[in-house]
Image (tube, rainbow, N blue to C red):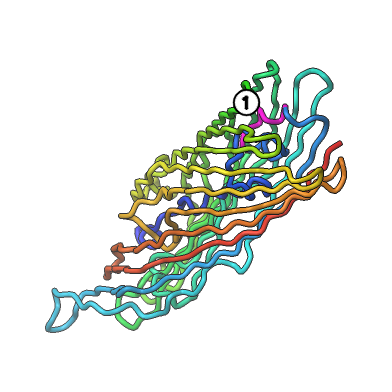
Amino acid sequence: MALLAACVPAQAWAGGYMLQEQSQLEIGRAFSGGAAAADDPSTLYYNPAGMTELPGIQVSTGATALFIASHQRDLGSTISRPAVGPLAGSAVVTPISGGNGGNPFAPVAPVPTTYATAQIGQSGIWLGFGLSAPFGLKLRYAPDFVGRYNSTYSNLLTLDAQPSVAWRVSDSLSIGGGMDVQYADVTLEGAMPSVAAGGTDTMAKLSGDDIALGWNVGALLKLRHCLRIGLHYRSQVKHALKGQSELSGFTGTLSALNGSTPIRAPLTLPGSVTVSISFPLDGKTRFMATGRHYNWSVFDQLRVVFPDGTISAKDYRYRDSWSLSAGFESVRSERITLRAGAMFDSTPTNPAFLSTRVPDGDRSWLSAGMSYRISPHLTLNASYAHVFIERQTLVRTDTFVGSTVDNRLRSSGNVDMLATSVTARF
């Protein structure tokens, strides 16, 4: 069990696992509309109170294609093993063999969303339902990756169903809220070095899934001069993953370690607080800005609980993070609306515990988009964004049975995204 825990010492979750891309329209203005724009059914995710600005029945469905480029460069990773023979008692330090792992991400990573809202007569009540993937990441390094003792494969999938309701309290105030029924599935893999130099690596895998509940609530204020202020809170979601640990590749006297063992692992995904404003600059153009705070500090440890009650825990000490975005939107004609925006999104990762599982850093966004009104009942939205990710240098030491691994790697990368959605109004 201790061997397995040592194999998965890296950070399991980071800012890179939180998917901002929950609205193809919002991408075009760098999410600056957030909790205040309320001009598309995707407001359900950012602030359900905004549904009260959507008359009738409206449905929006679309997807975002992520093109992620990530590169790692070895800065001199080494492995230390005990010496044998006349030098017994000392350590033999050698470079870790292998390459830079290639781009661990798939050529294209899709992020789909669907939202629907419905006004219930003249009651002042709106109902809504959304399907999204708020957290997710999948990456696999080449088998000879020099950082394989840190990670080889990571996969986090979440699916979130959000039934919601909103009430127009008055002409200037609306409130709304909803439940988050969230499914999470996690798989982590890594290699462990052989005790003797020149031996074959062994492999370890952790996997588990769970369904858990969260909630969110928001308010939308409409003040004089068409100023809107949106407030939204999304709770953290506490998962209790259940699954298996698997060890393979042991030989000789250690072969008894091969096999599967049931495990439990708590996983808390962070909540957020959002504040947004929107106001017109003239009859055709409006300015929007959004600030968000994410309570990533809820991820302090990765704990794995084994059937005999043994707990293996690693401290990661994530920090709360924040983002700030601003954007403009301009109605150019009865059919065409143009938008653009920029955002800074800080990483929650702790520099003392960086990991190849999440090659993450502070991110800066530039984006643009447009909407084309095909008919009074149908609108096509399209957006493009480029994300600059700050370079990070990983320096970490992990101890295994009979060896110590010192990884020194530099990661760099960027993301391009193309997003499109269709909004239907009835």
Q: Position of residue 378 (x, y in %)?
A: 84, 45
Identified at 56% across, 59% down, the residue is 386
Occupied quadrant, residue 178: top right
Magenta run includes residue 302? no
> Label 1: which residue?
220
The residue stretch that appears in magenta? 46-52
- Where's residue 342, x and y in %? 54, 49
| Residue 253 vertical placement versus 234 (above, below) | below
Q: Is residue 329 left or right of residue 390?
A: right
Residue 414, image x, y percentages = 51, 63
The residue at the point 21 percent across, 74 percent down is 82
* Quadrant in the picture for the C terminus: top right
Q: Is residue 304 above or below residue 275?
A: below
| Magenta stretch: helix, strand or loop mostly | helix
Quarter of the image with the N terminus in it: bottom left
In the image, 404 versus 396, the foreground residue is 396
Count up the numbered dots. 1
Membership of 51 in magenta stretch:
yes
